[in-house]
Amino acid sequence: MPELPEVESVRQCLVNSRPSLLGRVVQQVQVLRDNVVAGDLNQLGCVLTGARCDQIQRHGKYLFFGFSLNHQADQIWLTVHLRMTGRLHLVPSLATLPRHARLMLHLDQELALRFDDPRGFGRVWVVDDPAAVTAGLGPDALLLDRDEFLERLKGVKRQLKPLLLDQSFVAGIGNIYADETLFQARLHPERRSDSLAADEKERLYAALHQVITQAVDLKGANIDGVFEAGRFPVAVYGRQRLSCQVCGELIIKIRVGQRGTHFCPVCQYC
Ligand SMILES: [Zn+2]
């Protein structure tokens, strides 16, 4: 499942490709599976046709594509959540459609933005303002600074694993980077946030910042061959029954808050 680093990698790819998605004008919206659109199908086509993509923003795991019509100042925002297996590709508009293609935005310069999604949980919709979506989210994990993190921890009484996964606490962390963060911080995933000493809170922030920053630099993690470009080296996620790279003990997998959780019972003893 794409988390912040993988979604940021998708964003950068669409911005930096030559030609870029930025500046492209939508000529036609082709919905291949109706349920990919959350909301009104016809509205999507009406508001996007003829509009130019001016910016691509991200908050947590959400992507926001800012479109404007005829150089007007007002923008409308195509919001995309990739969920489990969604991917976005900038492709030649006449390229063969894969079986799991859900949506095509046909663009100028004979290009198309194509949304593929084998599992089919990903969704797109249009909003007037990204704040309509981000209001319910915590700060973006990549931009979160130490003081804000420590402030947000105050008064929170939760196990660390579910807390890191809670998008209203901090946005962008999923199962991979929650497990990697807790390993780097040497903290047990079932530890309660209100039991942390000051130095452990500092360690947790430092680990979160380091893991997310490094993962963004390395274009995310390539788990199950889904994000081929990702080079982030996981230390515990998916490595149950393999040796811990620090102490040699076997990594174990348990369930915490209904989520598979990987950790080292020696390095993360409490
Ligand atoms: Zn270990």
Image (spheres, rainbow, N blue to C red):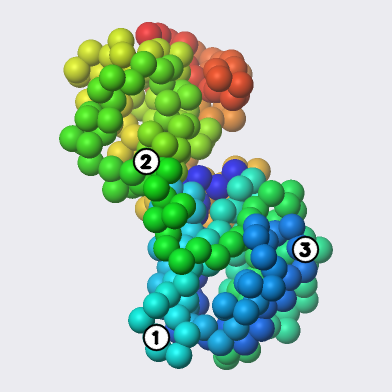
Residue 72 disc label: 1
Tag 1 and tag 2, C-beta contact below 8 Å: no
As displayed, is residue 165 above or below residue 156?
below
- Residue 231: tell me if it is visible: no
Q: Among all residues in the image, which is located at the extreme right?
A: 99
x, y percentage for residue 25?
A: 53, 86
Q: Are marks 1 and 3 in contact (CB under 8 Å)?
A: no
* Quarter occupied by the C terminus: top left
153 with respect to 46 (left or right): left
Q: Where does residue 181 sit, x and y in percent of width and height? A: 39, 30
Measured as percent of width and height from the top left, residue 156 is found at 33, 20
The image's mark for residue 33 is 3
Q: Residue at x 46, y 66 (%)?
A: 128
Task: Measure how far apart labels 1 and 3 are at the Cα level.
Answer: 31 Å
Mark 1 to mark 2: distance in Å?
31 Å
Q: Is residue 8 left or right of residue 200?
A: right
